Amino acid sequence: MIRGIKEKDSEQLHLLFNEKHKNLACKFIHPDVHESKIETLVYEENNEIVGMIVLTAVKYSTNPYGTIEELIIRKSGEEHKLGKTLLTTAMDWFGKNEIKRVFVFAEREESELFEEMGFEKSDMIMYYKNLNK
């Protein structure tokens, strides 16, 4: 059986982590690991949704982090302004969820917006595998 994590699982997760990482679990697994969250926010104008952003707050480690899973804005000539508004709202949401670091995999055309909003480029390489084969 595979299921979502529960609050009562914390102790067993520490033991499992210790099996692999030799007593580091107390330093790395966050006590509120079961409190990870996902939030989808939409930007609405004149009863029409013109943008959305999908956020996650991950409390797996002692350094909880957030991710921006999606940022989608309808082409209108106002994409930059709407993107800034959605990102500002997202940063507020992350702050309320005690997230201090946020990651995003951005399309090249979005990079200027993220950099303007204070994001820094990473040297990380992203890998993927297509499972449709």
Image (cartoon, helix red, strand yellow):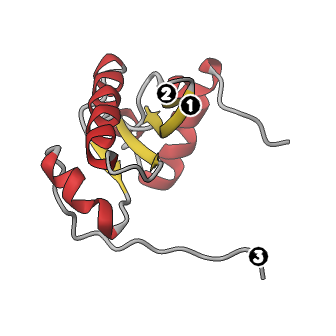
Whole-Å distance between the Cαs marked 1 and 3? 33 Å
Q: Residues within 10 Å of mark 2 (few under 14, many from 20)?
A: few
> Amino acid under label 1?
Glu
Disc number for residue 48: 1
Q: How far across and how far down the image is residue 68, in percent? A: 41, 45
Mark 1 neighbour class, 10 Å CA radius: few under 14, some 14 to 19, many 20 or more:
few
Image height of 28 relative to 35, above or below: below
Compare residues 100 and 114 and report the one nearer the observer.
114
Q: Work out how far the residue at label 1 is from the one at label 2, CA to CA, in angstroms.
A: 5 Å
Residue at image point 65% right, 23% down: 6
The residue under label 2 is: 44
State the SS at label 2. Answer: strand
Residue 39, position in %: x, y? Answer: 52, 29
Q: Quadrant of residue 106?
A: bottom left
The mark closer to the camera, 1 or 3, is 1
Residue named by callout 3? 132
Question: Which residue appears at 54% of the width and 33% of the height?
Answer: 49
- Disc 1, disc 2: CB below 8 Å? yes
Residue in the picture at 41% in, 39% down: 25
Residue type pointed to by label 2 = Glu
